[in-house]
Amino acid sequence: MPRIAKGAIPSPNIWNSPRVYELENRAVDPEGAADAAMRALRPWDDATVLDIGCGTGYHLPALSSRAARVVGVEPHGDLAALARRRCAGLANVTVHAATAQDLPLPDASVDVAVARWAYFFGPGCEPGLRELSRVVRRGGAAFVLDLDATRGSFGRWFSHTVPAYSPREVEAFWDRQGWQRRALDLRMAFTRRADLEAVLRIEFTPEVAEQAIAETPGLEIPYPNVLRWRHF
């Protein structure tokens, strides 16, 4: 059995299918639009960067190329071990097996915190937000990248898979928290059709996944996202 940090919220796609999720990470946002949007708001050159829900550490090497220090946090112990292995040659990267709501970091020790498709999905993530307020120092910023369920085929497929999800309630939640938002028109670009189909099958219920596959010709999928942020 994998080691799971206490209080972790399961992530069914990467927890159950890390190899397929690796294909998804490679496919998402080939232009780097999300990173560019975040850096325009708060650069992380020579900064301490926290990657919350870092999974197998896919984004840690790129972050470490600019940042002075990178800390990855991942509640799934086996995935955290893979992230450590991935970054074994990077002296400025540390990975902890821990949760967003119990970060193993000192107060005011982080310049930039990033969560990509992890934990901060709206109502219920208040403990993690309190931890962000504790660990991000004055002049820093936190970013949350999430699917926009109100737009495009991907949003429709997601809504059919998770019918209890309410975009209106999520938007109201972030408004109350005082976070800002920007729509991002990302895409997934694959080199093999089999990889595209495998990714759709870990993201949606079997019925919805087959519908999505039938509706998606070629090797690309539009992937509408929302970038949310707060300066501290």
Image: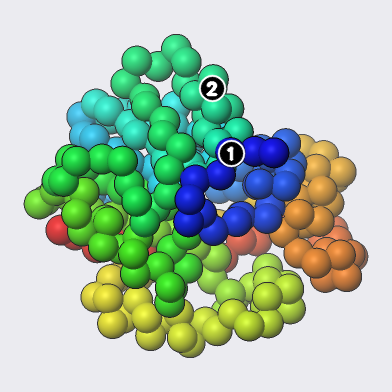
As drawn, the label of residue 20 is: none
Disc 2 residue type (three-letter): Arg
- Residue 212 in view, yes or no: no
Q: Mark 1 — residue?
A: 3
Q: Residue at x 34, y 69 (%)?
A: 126
Q: Mark 2 — residue?
A: 86
Q: Residue furthest left?
A: 138
Nearer the observer, 91 or 67: 91
x, y percent for residue 163: 68, 82
Q: Secondary structure at mark 2?
A: helix
- Residue 179 in view, yes or no: yes
Q: From what the image shows, is residue 124 above or below residue 186?
A: below
Q: Residue at x 19, y 41 (%)?
A: 106
Disc 1 residue type (three-letter): Arg
x, y percent for residue 28: 60, 47
Q: From what the image shows, is residue 227 above or below residue 79?
A: below
Q: From what the image shows, is residue 73 above or below residue 86?
A: below
Q: Residue at x 68, y 71 (%)?
A: 158
Indicate the quadrant containing the N terminus: top left, top right, bottom left or bottom right: top right
